[in-house]
Image (tube, rainbow, N blue to C red):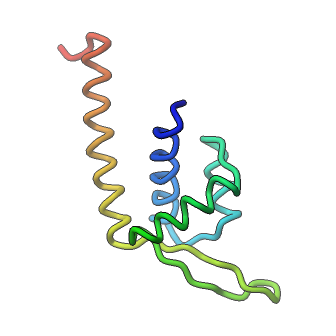
Amino acid sequence: MDAQMKKGLLDVCVLALLNHGDSYGYELISKISTVIDVSESTLYPILKRLEGVGQLVTYSREYNGRLRRYYRITPEGKRRLKDFDEEWQEMQRINAFVHGEDK
């Protein structure tokens, strides 16, 4: 898979998971890894970038005597998911056209 496409899909996977509830890094990696290969060294820069563009926020909570960083989707992140859905619908129409299924 093209690296840029994978990066964009990872963004959407992160936001989609967070749309179902707050989560922390290891949990995100575990869930996303079931559909696309992702490592800590890939995920954490994505989380930092999504936070930088306002699509998620972070907070810390104590867990087993240490602080764990959690991530929460923002309204901007929800808008990005909606935009992705519209883009995905367009890609499906293009795919159908390419394969002669647009009739």
Q: Is residue 56 left or right of residue 69?
A: left
Q: Quadrant of residue 44?
A: bottom right
Coordinates of residue 94 in the picture (x, y in percent): 27, 24
- In the depicted structure, whether residue 22 falls above or below residue 40: below
For the residue pair 89 and 76, the one nearer the viewer reads as 76
Coordinates of residue 41 in the picture (x, y in percent): 69, 55
Residue displayed at 45% across by 52% down:
12
Location of the N terminus (image quadrant): top right
Q: How many marks?
A: 0
Q: Quadrant of residue 88?
A: top left
Location of the C terminus (image quadrant): top left
Q: Is residue 20 left or right of residue 67?
A: left
Residue displayed at 45% across by 64% down:
19
Residue displayed at 64% across by 70% down:
24
Q: Residue furthest left?
A: 103
- In the depicted structure, whether residue 37 falls above or below residue 58: above
For the residue pair 49 and 11, the one nearer the viewer reads as 49
Q: Is residue 56 left or right of residue 76?
A: right
Coordinates of residue 49 in the picture (x, y in percent): 49, 64
Q: Quadrant of residue 58?
A: bottom right
Q: Residue furthest top?
A: 100
Coordinates of residue 64 in the picture (x, y in percent): 81, 85
For the residue pair 48 and 76, the one nearer the viewer reads as 48
- In the depicted structure, whether residue 89 falls above or below residue 56: above
For the residue pair 49 and 36, the one nearer the viewer reads as 49
